[in-house]
Each structure stands twice: as C-alpha cells, then as structure tokens.
Amino acid sequence: MKFGVVRFPGSCDDIDALQAAARVGDAVLLWHADRDLQGADAVIVPGGFSYGDYLRAGAIARFAPVMEEVAEFAREGGLVLGICNGFQVLCEAHLLPGALLPNTSLKFVFRQVQLEVEDPGTPFTRACARGERLSIPVKHTTGRFYSPEPVHVVLRYAAGENPNGSQDDIAGICNDAGNVFGLMPHPEHAVDPLTGSTDGLKLFESIRAHVADRVAV
Amino acid sequence: MSPTASPSSRHRQLGLTDHEYELIVERLEREPGDVELAMLSLMWSEHCAYKHSRKLLRQLPTEGPHVLLGPGENAGAVDVGGGLAVAFKVESHNHPSAVEPFQGAATGVGGILRDVFAVGARPIAVLDSLRFGEPAASERSRYLLRGAVAGIGHYGNSIGVPTIGGEIYFEHSYEQNCLINAMCLGIAPHERLIRSAAAGRGNVLVLLGALTGRDGIGGASVLASAELGEGDEAKRPSVQIGDPFAEKKLLECCLDLLDRGLLVSLQDLGAAGLTSSASEMASKGGVGLDIDVSRVPLREPGMEPFEIMISESQERMLCVVAPEHVGELMDVCERWEVLATTIGAVTDEDRLRVLDHGAVVADLPVHVLVDDCPLYDLEPAPPAPDEPPIYPAPRGARVLYGHESPGQVLLALLGAANLASRRPVFEQYDPVVQSRTLRRPDEADAAVLALPDGSAIAVSIDGNGRRVACDPRRGAAEAVYECAANLACVGAEPLGLTNCLNFGNPEKPHVAWQLTEAVAGLAEACEALEIAIVGGNVSLYNEAPSGPIFPTPVVGIVGKLPDAGRAGRLGFAREGDAIALVGRFEPSLAGSEVEKLRGRAPVGELPFKDVQAVRDARVAVRDAVRAGALHSAHDIAEGGIAVALSECCVAEGIGARVTLPEGLDPFAETPGCAYVVSGPEEAVSALGPIIGQVGGARLELIGLLDLAVSELARARELELAEWV
C-alpha cells in the first residue's frame, strides 16, 4: 500500500510522518502546489505550521491546490489522516467537524500523554482494543477541540491527561463516514522503541490492514 | 551629512576612536565617505572585529582529528562517521533580548540556525543557555524569562527544529543584562559542507530571502542620529523581528540549492548585514565584490545606500553562483517561494565596491574592512585583596540561616530557582520533531540524537557564572569538565567544542583579568581532555551601572556514542541496584548553591582538580555506559551529592538508601569530576566504592536525612511553573 504525505511550506513533521508510514508501507511526499495524489491509498496531512499559520492554524493550507484533491479523495471514501496541524487543516476544510482553539494555558505544550481508544472500529484504530491506552506525545499551541454538535470521538485523553482544555477530553475524531480522522497527538513520534513508545504504530498498522482488506475485496 | 557635523564628531558617534579614524584615513590615503564610514565603523566594532579578544583566543586549541571546519566559518563541523558531519555553534543575543525578550530570543535562534545551514548542514537541534536576575525578587526578570522562553519556543517549534536541552541560571548580576545564548547543531554529508569564501571572477552574487528593511539600524543607534542627515524615519524603533516561516522556506531552499550543486559559496546575513557578509566572503576568497544596492529588494521606500548595506533584516542569505547556474537557481527559489535577486558580481580586485544605480558610493580595500582593525591588548589586574568584592552577597536570595536540618537544606536547594525542575520550560519546546531524539531533557545528563547507522551523537551545554566569579580559571575549566562529564553519562566521547564568552567591559582591569583567566582555563581543560574548539562567539560589555555580569563562559560539546541503543539515563531504574560513587570527589563550599542560599558572596578559590583523575573517571563511566553495564549515570554538580541523588530518585520515582563517605559535605560542589551510577553490584563496584542501594520510595542518607521521593519531587516543581 502507498501513503501520500502532504508537504506544505511550513510543514515540520512531514518527514517524520513519511518515515513512520514507511514502516508499514510505501510512502511518498505530495507537493502542496500539485493537484496530484500520486495514486496514494491513504493521505496524511502532517503536523507543522503550514504557510506559517500566522492567520489561524490551517486557515491558508485548506486553499492549497493539493487540498482540492484531498477533499475529492475523501468524498470518494479514501482514508485521510490529519495529525496536529493536519487536524486543524481538515477542520478548516470542513472535512471534519468542529475547530481547534488555543490551549487554555495559551502556551505551546509538549508532553507525553496517555490516550484511551474510544472507538476501535474505525479504519485508523482497528489494531487497538476498546479502552486501550496509548502513550503518544502532544506538541501544539492550538489543540483545544471544540464542537457545538456531537462528534464521532475516536480517542480521548485519559483522566487527568488533557493537555489543552479540549472539550470532553477529545484527542481525536472522525467524520460520519469514518474515513477522515484527525488527532492532536503525534502517532508518528511513537513508532520507534529507541525514541520511546511504539503505540503510535498501531494507527499506521490499522490503516495498512484496512487498505489490504479493501484491495482483497 | 548635516553641515553641523564635522568629520571628527562623525566617527566618534559611530563608535570609532580618534586613533582608529586616523588609521582608516592613513590606510585609505583619504577621508572615508559616509557609506564607507558606516561600513567601517561596524566592521571595526568589537562585535565584528573581536578587537579585545582576538589575541586571547589564539591560545585556544582548534585542531583535532575530527575537525572538518574550524573557527572562522559560519559554524564549526566535526566528522561523526558514516560520511556525515555535524556542524554546530553557540552565539549570544544578549542585548536585543534585554530590550525585547521575545523577539530578541527568537531572532537569536533564527541567527544561529542560519549559521548552521550556511555551511550546508540541516539544523537538527537547538539548545539554549539562559541567565536572568532573581525571578522571585524581580518582575523584570520574570518578564525577560517568560518572553525569552516563549520566543525560543516560537522560532524553534515553528521551523521544525527540536529544542533538546539547555540550562537556566538566575543571579542578581544578570538583572539588567540577561544572557541568551543559543546553540544549534546541523547534519550534512561531508560533500555538502560549503565554505563562505567567494570565488570566480564574473560569478554572480545573489541575495536570497526576506526583503531588506530598517531593522537593526536603530540598534546601531549612532547611525540613526540626526548628524547623518536622517529624519524621524530613521529613528523608528527597530528591534529585529523574526519570521520562522520565511526562514523555514529559506532553509529548505538553500539545502536544495546545495544538493543540486548550484552554489560556489554561501553566507548568512547577521550583524552588520550585507557589509559584514560581503566583506567576509570577499576576504576569505581573496577576491573583490561589486554590489549595487539599487537592486536590493526593499521593504520600505527611501532607504539610503548605507542603510541597505548595514540593515540587519532577518532571514536573508548571500550566495555566489556561476552565471550559467543562475537560471536553475531562480527556478528552485521560485518553487520554495524564496525571493532571489542578483545584486552584484565577484571581481578579482581586493575591493568591496558599493554602487547605487551604477554610481560608486563606497570603494574600500577588503583587507582594510576585515583585517586592519587594530587589536588591543587587555590590561588585566586581579581585584586587590583589600577592595570590596566585585559581586556583593546576594540580596534577597538568603533562605538558610544555619539552624536547618540537612533535610530542610536539601528541600531548599531542590526548590531554589537554579536547581528546580526545568519541566515548565522544556514543555514549551518541541524536543522530538525530526524523529532523532533518543534522550529528551530530564531523561539523561546530555541530549542524544540517533544517526542513520545505529550510532548516536550527544550534546550538552554548560556554564556556571557564579563559580567563574569565584575563580575564573578553574571555574571556566570546570565548565568544560562538567560538559564532558554529562556526555560520559550517556556514553559519549567529545568530538568538538563551541563556546560563548559572556563578560563585562574588557577595558576594566578586573574584567580583563576574568576574561584572560577564563580563556586560559578553557584552553587548559580542552587540552587536558583533548577536545578541539571549532567555533564560538564573544559577547563583551555586558554591564549595568551596578557592575558587570558574572563572567560567564558557556561551553557546548558534541560527542558520539557507538550504539544508540545503549545511551545512558540519569534516573535510578531498578530496585536492589547498587549505587557507586565514581571519581576523585573533593568538593568545597566555595561558589556553591548552598552558600548562595546562606547569603554568602561568590568568593573563594575553587577546589583543585587532578586532571588525570578527571579523565580516568570520565572514561570509566563512558565505557561502562557503552558496555550497557549501568542502569543509570549522573554527574555530581550544583547542590552536591545530595542533590544529584535526589535527581536520580525523582526521575523514575524510586528511592535509595545511601551512606555518604566519612566527612563528605552532602551539599559541597566540584562539578565535572564525580558521578553517581547504579547497576548490578559487580558492574558498579569496578567503578568506585559502593555507597548504597536503590529501592523503596524514600531517599535516606544515613545519619543525615530521610525524605519521601514524592516530597523531593514536589520541592523541585514549586519554583519555575508560576513564572513561565
């Protein structure tokens, strides 16, 4: 299977996501100015500060040419994973509901946090068990999820672990169709035993398994 | 020129002495023009010419088997094996940060990043060494601390370079003059390393990156004065503003250009802007340069040629490219959305010529700009014994009065601003982006980054101004020993060293003495450990009306360990492990943290160190970590062995029961020569005497104190959280 990782000017965790995805499949970078997903089976919108994020996190990136293709891919049921800034971009693009607001501390926070898997039934979490704990770092200034409407929660911060004041401890959500997933924690930074936890790898493995099943059908 | 300014007042306002001005006239055989004088005054400034320190710095060892680029390039570089080089440098941004801490610190990070990618290396890590006044007593210090931490985080986090370590100390002497030293490491294949020497007559000079504005011109405040004929526009407050997004694009663009082999040379624009960059490139290449300032893209209209030549606008680079490669260079820059403009050409004369729409406005021999500034001898004199101490006893810092139990003293130390947990600061920095970070802050004495071949590099930055204030020679040497000890604790051997020398006014005899002694101490320690100095920075005149800062040499060492999987950790890890004390440990109270808390001035000779013993202990710990024989290793530094043991307990929340050697003061210090290690008894007993055992939930120093580890942890968490 092939992952496509979007690269905007200002993306920071693009290579990290590329390397993490390459642990379970093929992975290529997708240039922001090209309307071309290069035949990817799943698209990752990575972390960073796309276009500097001086206006509002993700507000400019949603207008990138590549995002037109990502939106079309999502409408057709393709798997799209947004990590941190990618989550912000997907919300701005209305591929996911809700919005990310500044942390209640108003500060950047880096922390290794414990997450709980609320829904192991999505293409992104099928390698996990319900209630399973994942140790994955967060690092952001604008990570407080808010939605006035009910949303499909996939991951929550474990009790006492919420780093940003997110509504109902929400760490990751998906769309109603279940094929677009956004989360603030960085699973690509939890894939190597040498650097710490490998819990993030389960999300990439879930995607691979889902795509493999789909291809088999 | 305003008619009221005579030539003699002109140069003084620009910071040149009468003697220096006479020298310029003699060398040029004429009076310099306005643009020329502006350029010369900056190139002959302390900042660019190192006129009070260059002679001293010659005694530092700069050659070693691993050195690929030494002092004089934008950053030094060492060979780390596997065809890879690591480039690194530390630089100060003290004065801008004292004016505006957020932008001052942010642009300090931006500047050191540019120094590293200017040699062709991708920045992979940032560390910071920060000094402020006492935060509990000073709103100004809290403001500077908060602003600087936020600024460092803003720039490093946004550009995707991890901040993996650093240090912060608080002392009254930094109240007016905070120190912001930023260190950056970058990685490159050997063949991508590039020097800044311009070459090739007819080659094209291209300016890359941001528009040029009036930033930093007000910083050289004399230039904004009315005598140069400027109106109010030139008096606009002009702190440099950092734009990490612009630098991110510039960084990716420059590395792309280098990977395509399109550049002859590359140089960042820092202090003194185009003037300094062009002069250095021409000087190193033994060539001349023509620059037409009318081609430089400007952010604001009406800028004078001299302003364009000395603007310190951020996020700009200067490169030399062969004419046939200009087209491809422009295409690459367009892809990265980086502005690129041809502004001049390489000539074969020894002249830097500045043109404005083709008319010559400055024409100076390159050697006069770069090499002819007079170097001054210092006139060092130690403070006389009957004089009052340079640094008085710390006001308001006294929390210990002599009746406290050892347990109370330990809790006071752990809660002191200088020793408390740095977590509230480190949590504002991204330490993991780029996926190389094997040891984050608080996990080990040095940060550790993975290399592609399964080995790793380690880095630490250290300095303790209070100890250097006591004893400049031994204090400076101690910084090197401590930094090397930190590397040993993760199993790393030093490959190279960078330093930043932060001192007061060198024209004062006692500051000159501090500087002279400290440089001698650095040289001695580097020679003793066989570490080459590959680059650095000098920041002088760090003075307030109340006096100079503590003399503060800051040392950063990069080292290597063969097996990334065996990088050491600092925390006790397993119940039942034996604890050993490694090294010849003969500490004293001079300059110690506990003495500060007792309200005593930083005076007294520091303990003598037996260099052979320092080396032996370091090698023993390094090799034991590399062999995987230890479960933890931690050097004994500020706060003495009691604080070191507390830190080992708090890291993983495991206690220890320890009997200290007879007569050892638990709070006495001599950083850089001793360690506490834990592991199986047979492994650790080979390194030094067993002093205790890991286990339980309390730290017990037999006959002295007995405290819950949770209480130690709580004491460390109190101080900084509320201030950052």
Image: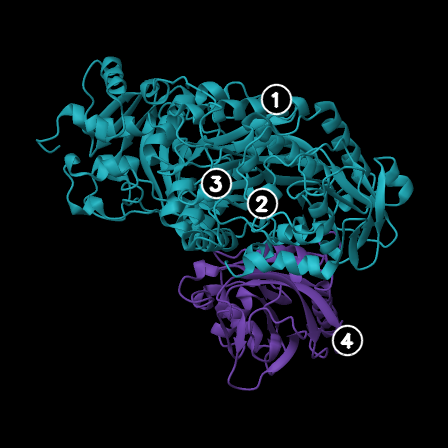
Chain colours: A purple, B cyan
Q: Which residue is tagged 2?
A: B598
Host chain of mark 4 = A
- Label 3 secondary element: helix
- Give the image location of residue B404, x and y in percent: 66, 51
Inspect the image, locate mark 1, and give the three-letter code of the amino acid beneath it: Glu
Position of residue A164 in the picture relative to residue B690 (left or right): left
Q: Which residue is tagged 1?
A: B524
- Label 4 secondary element: loop
**Given the current orientation, which residue lies at the most extreme right position?**
B682
- Give the image location of residue B629, x and y in percent: 85, 42
Host chain of mark 1 = B
Q: Residues within 10 Å of mark 3 (few under 14, many from 20)?
A: many
Report if the CB atoms under discs 2 and 4 are less than 8 Å apart. Answer: no
Q: Residues within 10 Å of mark 4 (few under 14, many from 20)?
A: some
How far apart marks 3 and 2 lie (CA) works out to: 38 Å
**Which numbered disc, 3 or 2, marks the residue closer to the eye?**
2
How far apart marks 2 and 4 lie (CA) works out to: 56 Å
How far apart marks 4 and 1 lie (CA) works out to: 60 Å
Choose the circle earlier in sequence order: 1 or 3.
3
Choose the circle earlier in sequence order: 2 or 1.
1
Host chain of mark 2 = B
**Which numbered disc, 3 or 4, marks the residue closer to the eye?**
3
Q: Which residue is tagged 3?
A: B112
**Given the current orientation, which residue lies at the most extreme bottom position?**
A149
* B464 is higher (above) or lower (below) than B709: above
For the residue pair B632 and B126, the one nearer the viewer reads as B632
How far apart marks 3 and 4 lie (CA) works out to: 46 Å
**Which numbered disc, 2 or 1, marks the residue closer to the eye?**
2
> Are the residues flagged by discs 3 and 2 from a single subunit?
yes
Inspect the image, locate mark 2, and give the three-letter code of the amino acid beneath it: Arg
Position of residue B152 in the picture relative to residue A82 (left or right): left
Which disc, if any, is residue A129? 4
